[in-house]
Amino acid sequence: DAGVTQSPTHLIKTRGQHVTLRCSPISGHKSVSWYQQVLGQGPQFIFQYYEKEERGRGNFPDRFSARQFPNYSSELNVNALLLGDSALYLCASSPGLAGVNTGELFFGEGSRLTVL
Amino acid sequence: RKEVEQDPGPFNVPEGATVAFNCTYSNSASQSFFWYRQDCRKEPKLLMSVYSSGNEDGRFTAQLNRASQYISLLIRDSKLSDSATYLCVVIPTGGFKTIFGAGTRLFVKA
């Protein structure tokens, strides 16, 4: 079975641009969450979606937005990119049984964003 | 104060050694606790859940101390393949936030 897939794997943008990152969860998983990981730090929670609804949001500015589609795939959008947005963006899926966050996360390999 | 704090290490240990990591959390209402492992330039992977009664999985033992708000991970008989960053994860009660610590780096040497 396919794991969590993310695209693109690497991308380079300039300040002020916007970016869209995509994630396909494991088949049957209804919950998707997004994380930002800066070198030397742990993943920082950005969003969690379950059944197309936002269930949790971390301490990120409104420039960050996301959505989940009927097939449970998800997009993370970041507008007005700053140099500090350079990071590895990780998507994780989980079964999301009854919408409960079980903490059992299956991560994709991430999208590495460089902002110049 | 960070919500989840870990000693960044690195811990450098010889093969066969026993090593322990601690992690403290600030929210006393936290409900679920986990250890994840992340290899260099790879994605995190679930190592084990942490239960109040303590739990063991082979060479790995996890403990939770709610009174002192810390969790621990003990690795016995360390292997070269245990070299990785170990991430402490906490889920607050009623929330959908998943909070990761900054990780503790372990190097196991022959």
Image (cartoon, rainbow, N blue to C red):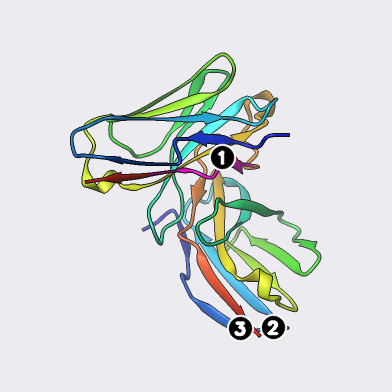
Compare marks 2 and 1 and give the one earlier in the sequence. 2
**Image x and y of residue A69, in percent:** 52, 17
Viewer-nearest of discs 2 and 1: 2
Q: Work out which residue is located at the far top of the displayed protein and give it.
A: A70
Which residue was labeled with disc 3?
Answer: B13
Which residue was labeled with disc 2?
Answer: B15
Give the structural element (helix, strand or loop) at label 3. strand
Asked where in the image residue B81 lies, by quadrant, the reply is bottom right
Q: Residue at x 40, y 38 (%)?
A: A58
Q: Residues within 10 Å of mark 2 (few under 14, many from 20)?
A: some
**Position of A22 compared to B80: left or right?**
left
Which residue was labeled with disc 1?
Answer: B93
Report the front residue among A72 and B55. Answer: A72
Q: Was residue B60 drawn as part of the magenta stretch in this picture? A: no
Q: State which chain disc 1 sits on.
A: B
Q: Is residue A44 above or below residue B8?
A: above
Amino acid at circle 3? Val
Compare marks 3 and 1 and give the one earlier in the sequence. 3
Are discs 3 and 1 less than 8 Å apart at CB?
A: no
**Position of B77 compared to B102: left or right?**
right
Magenta span: A105-112
Viewer-nearest of discs 3 and 1: 3
Amino acid at circle 2? Glu
Amino acid at circle 1? Thr
Q: Residue at x 50, y 57 (%)?
A: B41
Q: Residues within 10 Å of mark 3 (few under 14, many from 20)?
A: some
